[in-house]
Amino acid sequence: MEPISSNIAAQEELSVAPTGLVLQPFVFSIAVFFVVHAISLGIWRLFVDAKFAVWKYSPQPFGMYLFWGILVLVFIGFNFGMAGFSTFKQPARGCIATVVTVGLAFLLPGVLVYGYGALDPTFTSVGGVGYGAAGLIVLIGFYGFGILATGMSGWPWSDSGVRPVVGSVAQLAGGCCLTGLGYFLLIYPNLTTASEPHAPLLALPVAIGWFYSVIVAWLTTFLIFDNWPWSMLKRKSQTALAALVGNFLLGTALYAGHLALLRWVLIPSSALEKLGTTLPIWPAQLGVWIAFWLIFWANVAGNWPNRFGMLTNRVIRASICWGLGLISFEIYTRWFAVSVLHEAEIVPGFGGDPLTWVDLLNYVMLIYVVYFEFYGLSKEKSAN
């Protein structure tokens, strides 16, 4: 997903554009952090907050529309590279792209729930049961569409000589195939009330927790490790296929490690008892915080550091992102979720549902970065 990008030169060129308040790199990062959180908190107060919401649509259908908004942003910003919007100047470009994204984020899942849901009760709007089923398509789609434009560099279409728009449409078709395959293997059998095509391969909490760990692996290798180790392969086709498959292997290891960390360190024993069989979903709850910092670090903080050797740079970046992810998870579950966002406690002193809040942060951040190009703020050019 560009510019979920590890291209430092491109970020520097964007960040020094003489628009808005010019800030030192560190101050710039802090300012973007607060802008993203302020906008996200405002949206939360309007539509989600159990205590203050003006129009309460949480957990559903807010979650469904939010997740589909992220997926549409992937289509527009990454698979199609902002085609059709780049001719507009800021802030019109960002505003138009945002309006289109929000519109499609309502339309596409609406067709599933209020249209196809009449044929398949898995997606029915009756009782709102279809909202979750439609929303979980995005879990698979974020990787299915995103990996094509990033770790796979648009292969095989980028090497075929076709026009960019044709390549983008081909990416969209390829993403649909990958997403459909993953969804009907991992998610749909857990949700359908009809006769199942096959028994679930994984229980739903395990499928969600494991697949989000794959997403964390992908974002880490592409953003923080500059697509290493897959980039070690000589041919573009080999790199693309290694990235597509290799992230599943790395994600499986991350899932096991994060699950152990959650069980033995991060989640209180009383909460473990209450979570019961849903515990395997929590690597996704931790992973979404790590994903936030991976995206933030590569796109806002300039993927610092860049002055050392490749190995040292990557180890430091990963350590920072994982460390901030763990700290954020603890602050959120121990205080912020219940005291500020007014989410439900699981046990006294521990609660919340990080996936919804942090995906809102990611959505707002990506709109500001990809669509608005940090409009109103600029970063001083730094020699690092």
Image: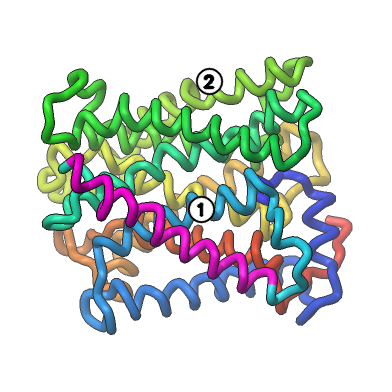
Task: Reply yes or no: does residue 98 show up in magenta.
Answer: yes
Q: Which residue is depicted at the point 27% across and 32% down?
A: 206
Disc 1 is placed on an element classified as helix
Q: Look at the picture and state if 248 lies above or below 106.
A: above
**Which is in the foreground here, disc 1 or disc 2?**
1
Q: Which residues are magenta?
A: 93-120
Front residue of 155 and 48: 155
Q: Which residue is depicted at the point 33% across and 52% down?
A: 111
Location of the N terminus (image quadrant): top right
Say left or right for 82 vs 133.
right
Q: Which residue is depicted at the point 75% across and 69% down?
A: 88
Disc 2 is placed on an element classified as helix
Q: Residues within 10 Å of mark 2 (few under 14, many from 20)?
A: few
Q: Residues within 10 Å of mark 1 (few under 14, many from 20)?
A: many
Q: Position of residue 38 (x, y in %)?
A: 49, 77
Say left or right for 65 vs 376.
left
Mark 1 and mark 2: Cα distance apart in space: 24 Å
Instruction: Return the residue at label 1.
Output: 72
- From this viewpoint, is residue 365 visible? yes
Q: Which mark is residue 245?
A: 2
Dividing the picture into quadrants, the one containing residue 44 is: bottom left
Q: Look at the picture and state if 144 lies above or below 31.
A: above
Amino acid type of the residue tagged 1 in the rendering: Val
Task: Reply yes or no: does residue 339 show up in magenta.
Answer: no
Amino acid type of the residue tagged 2 in the rendering: Val
Q: Which residue is depicted at the point 47% across and 24% down?
A: 248
Nearest to N terminus: mark 1 or mark 2: 1
